[in-house]
Amino acid sequence: MDYSQFLAMRQEIALLVVFLLVFLYDTFMPKKALAATASFSTVLFGLFTVASFLWGNPGEVSAFAGMYQTSATCVAIKNILNVGVLIVLIQSCRWVNGEFMSIRRGEFYELLLVTLFGMYLMISARHFLVFLIGLESASLPLAAMVAFDKNRYESHEAAIKYMLTAVFSSAVFMMGLSFVYGLTGTLYFSEIALQLGNDIDPLLVVALAFVISGVGFKLSLVPFHLWTADVYQGAPTSVTSYFSVISKGAAAFAFLVILVQAFGTFYSTVWEWMLYALIILTITIGNLFAIRQTNMKRFLAFSSISQAGYIMLGVVACNAHGLESMMYYILVYIFSNLAAFGVIGAIENQTGKVLMTDYNGLSKTNPWLAFSMMLAMFSLAGIPPFAGFFSKFFIFNAAISQGSIAIYILVLIALINTIVSLYYYLLVVKAMYISPEEPQIATFRSACTERLGLWICVSGIIALGIVRFFYDSINALGAGLNAPDTITNLLNMIG
Amino acid sequence: MQPVIPIIILALPLAMFLFLGLCGHKLSHRMAGILGTAGMGVTMTLAYITAFTYFFSGSPEFIDADAHTRLQAVIFNYDWLAFTPQLVIRLGFLLDPISALLLVVITTISFMVHLYSNGYMRDHHGVWEKGFQRFYAFLSLFSFSMLGLVVATNIFQMYIFWELVGASSYLLIGFYYTKPSAVSASKKAFIVTRFADLGFLLGILVLSFYTGTFNFTDFTSTEVADGVYQISETTSAGIRDLIANSTVPMFMGASVLTWALVLIFIGGMGKSAMLPLHIWLPDAMEGPTPVSALIHAATMVVAGVYLVARLFPLYLMEPAALDIVVVVGALTALYAAMVACTQLDIKRVLAFSTISQIAFMMVSLGVTRPEFHHGVGYMAGMFHLFTHAMFKALLFLCAGALIHAIGSNNYTDMHGLRKYMPITHITFLIGCLAIAGIIPFAGFFSKDEILTATMGYSTVWYIWMSLVAGLTAFYMFRLYYLIFWWKEHKVHEGHPAPHDQPWTMTLPLVILAAISCVAGFVPMGNLVTWNGHEMFDNVNFFTNLSALNWQVAGMSLAIAIVGILVATVMYRKENRYPQMMKQALPRLWDWCFHRFYWDELYQFITHKIIFGCISKPIAWFDRNVVDGTMNAMAFVTQRLSFAIRGLQSGNVQFYVWMYLIGALLLGLITAICLI
């Protein structure tokens, strides 16, 4: 066996090393040193993130008989996720250091790193078994994380609900896989595409629907989304923010890889139409529910459902431009959503309040928190000149470049939905800035880690939109491909 | 030339604006004033160094010594926005005769105004005006914008700064934002000039569409040989095609180039207050007087002249456009001079005088033909821009001193001030002599060159412009006598007698008066010409004097003296001649006093026609159709959201059912559709 193949997995291996170091620290260090677990893990992960930017790219390498594949694009999406995880870790320091968490600090980091490892596998898998392992290791530990607030009833309830639906979704997914295996006799993405040829078997369509539902569950696409609101509300805020951005970003990329590599030949006949239906449902229903929410975390749950619909526009475009826009969208979405969760977390840690009415008059007592929240809402709603506007613009642009009439209608529906979403995002701003009622939350100074996290997010929201470096770097991944935009280009870009 | 100094020239005023605007309220008033003035002083010094280097260093970058021709030098040019290889917006610094001249003019006047405002913006008890720091921040912003405008390397950069200049003018006119008249004046100025800028923008688009370039250096290189215009090699291919090709695209009987130039000229008419877009300038006098001196006399209002001068080689290819410039300029000159004879408010008199003098410059550019006296008109126009900036700023600053001392804008409250304010009196007199065109003051030389150039173009316009020159002398001395003579000044009891102002205000007056005395001797013919070619072989202090065409000079001097004499007879002492004249020509006097009812005409057009016939139907459409659609959408969304709320039941078995049904339906429906 050629052991140099392991070099291709350097990001995964480095992540495992980080995991092991945290685990050893947590297990063998004396009690006193355990108080520093949070700082230790965060700094370690920060180093890992930097190292991953510097040395993470082995070029386009296929390893382990083609089951594992990495490329500049895969590395880039992993790096984007790393940045998000780092922000989550920084923001959660205060919560982890709380009295109540004292005996299970290490576990939070260990579980989180394992799920991240699972997501890495999902991104790089080119064989359904590897993918399945990634999917499961990204799902099951999350249930434990949801249940972290073990004294809170909602936390258990959410964990159980998540567990049940996740297991069910895995079952359906594997059912789909078995159909695929039965039809083709292989689980390699590229070979499935070869075996299937161009004939459409009705069984294949059902199998594809099952596969889509399995990944759609992670992305919380409607109608596989029903767990989302309960889990987001019940889970600790740090876990929710992890759920809402990182898990979603990884699943979106993996989704694209599966659909394009394994089922690319059925794009225009089968899954393009499935995705149209799912996107329209997801954006619209997410918006319709978001309007009615009064709990901030539940509100952001529905908001993130509809955002996932926008991310899917990059998949349905099915060209290199779509993938670039999707990665940029994920990057921007990470910063915007984490800014919102950062504010929610800071307030919840201080006062325990999470209702929208609690935010009335926040701008008078905590102007900086209100300001960060406002920027986050503006960016999520897509108001220029904040980054969210540009990410929406690029992803709509990419979808339109696909060129069919149907996608024009789809983008039009998505555009109308942005107007609706503007309404509920501005509800929060209105509560904070315009509402005449007495402020509910007294002035307080948030912890320095929370402020650091917010600073990073806010500068990201501003800079990502107006500094072209970021988009250019992502764009460079697809540059050098021959125009016009074709599915071959997209495959080349994925690697 | 290294780009360091030019960058500082632009960056320093901008930095001052940001600093004073953001942190000004933390500084004391005195400190903000000193800082702003010092910043402008440094900028002025650097601008002098730059201009001096350009004109006198003899560096091959700036002058072709063998051909005695000054060159255009692009000091730096930064690609700011690159949309496509053709469409690149650049920001840069272009040094050529006119931009170097304007650098000197702008920084000099701006520095004087900065200095002067330290005294002007506080009352007799030394109490500072509210918003003093804001005032200095805006002054810096204006200086930055104006400097950026004149050094623009391309027409798009010029347009950007053109709008910035308009915005800072708006801010400064409306400086006393609690005063309704100031607010409406600032809005009027902004809207009228913005309206004109629409023409400018269209002109830019047409021009760049057909020529394929924004850069000035691409379309400012024309040569004349044996009376034939030739396009030099450096000119952009687009323009060469336009000119050389007999199939120049035509539109409504004129070539697209003519259209572009006329549209661009409309932008210039707006900024330079040419008829019929002049209505904003008299109202703009609501701003503080130093602002009027800086923006509405010396710098911003000549931007239109500068624009025509900048694109002059293009205008030269389309004489029809130049003829339009002449007609507009000549009509404006006479109109404004007539109105200036009747106004009460001294700042309004000066404002109309400014309009009239800028029209002189426009005429001067319009009559320029290379075959006559080597295109003397272009030089004369720029020369007049330079001298006019100096003496008109002087006159405005004197007016500011008077207003500061008396507390009123009307000469009816002044009269006989010569004994009380001797320095103001003498400097004002010098300003009047300069604008009237009395030898050896600055205005004489420049105005004489303009009249010479006009004579070469057409005798009719020469006589017309000479008449305006006579009127200029008349109304300026009318103003002078009514302020300083007429009758004894009545000092109100309990008020201190009017007196000269503190040194910060008098020093700029003295400096500008000194410049107004000697500026006429600057050998402009060797510095600023339409093609950069030097007019004289060697120059000394008396070059301008010896180069005079005494036939024209004698005439213009005689006309000016007649104007002054008439004014002396009518206004030196209190008498009934003015009343008699008013009764002899009641209709004419009335029209002049009401500025030929232009404002009323605009009121009618905007309120009755535009608001009534266009705006109201559109407003109805907006309220009912656009808003109605939005409201309907909101209503439907709310109802839907209410109707489907049951989906999120909280029951996990239901969730799983939904999941399964969803997945099955997705597969089955697609499968059925395919079969």
Image (tube, coloured by chain):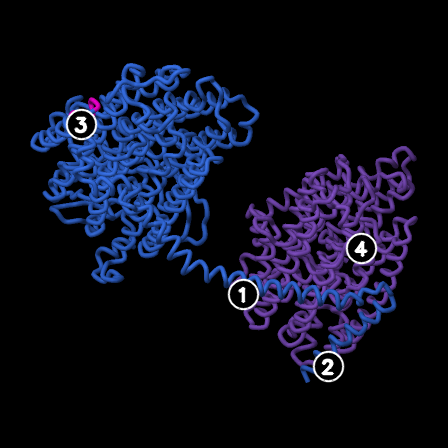
Chain colours: A purple, B blue
State the image coordinates of residue B362 (x, y, percent, origin top left). Answer: 23, 41
Q: Is residue B634 above or below residue B379?
A: below
Q: Residue B500: image x %, image y %? A: 35, 16
The CA distance from mark 2 to mark 1 is: 48 Å
Q: Are the two marked residues, 4 and 3, in contact with CB atoms closer than 8 angstroms? A: no
- Chain under numbered label 4: A
Badge 4 marks a residue whose secondary structure is helix
Q: Tell me if residue A104 can be seen.
A: yes
| Image mark for residue B570 | 3
- State the SS at label 2: helix
Q: Residue at x 70, y 76 (%)?
A: A195
Q: Is residue B133 visible?
A: no
The three-letter amino acid code for the residue at tag 2 is Pro
- Asked which quadrant contains residue A394, the reply is bottom right
Q: Are discs 1 and 3 less than 8 Å apart at CB?
A: no
Secondary structure of the residue carrying tag 3 is helix
Q: Which residues are magenta?
A: B569-574
Labels 4, 2: front one: 4
Residue farthest along the left direction in this orientation: B551
Residue B88 image point, x, y percent:
42, 49
Residue at which label 2 appears: A202
Sequence order check: which comes first, mark 4 or mark 2?
2
- The residue that label 4 is drawn on is A232
Discs 4/3, front = 3
Q: Are marks 1 and 3 on the same chain?
A: yes
- Residue A476 covered by magenta stretch: no
Q: Three-letter amino acid code at disc 3?
A: Met
Q: Nearer the viewer, residue A1 or A16?
A: A16
Q: Mark 2 falls within which chain?
A: A
Q: Which residue is mark 1?
A: B625
Distance CA(mark 1)–CA(mark 3): 65 Å
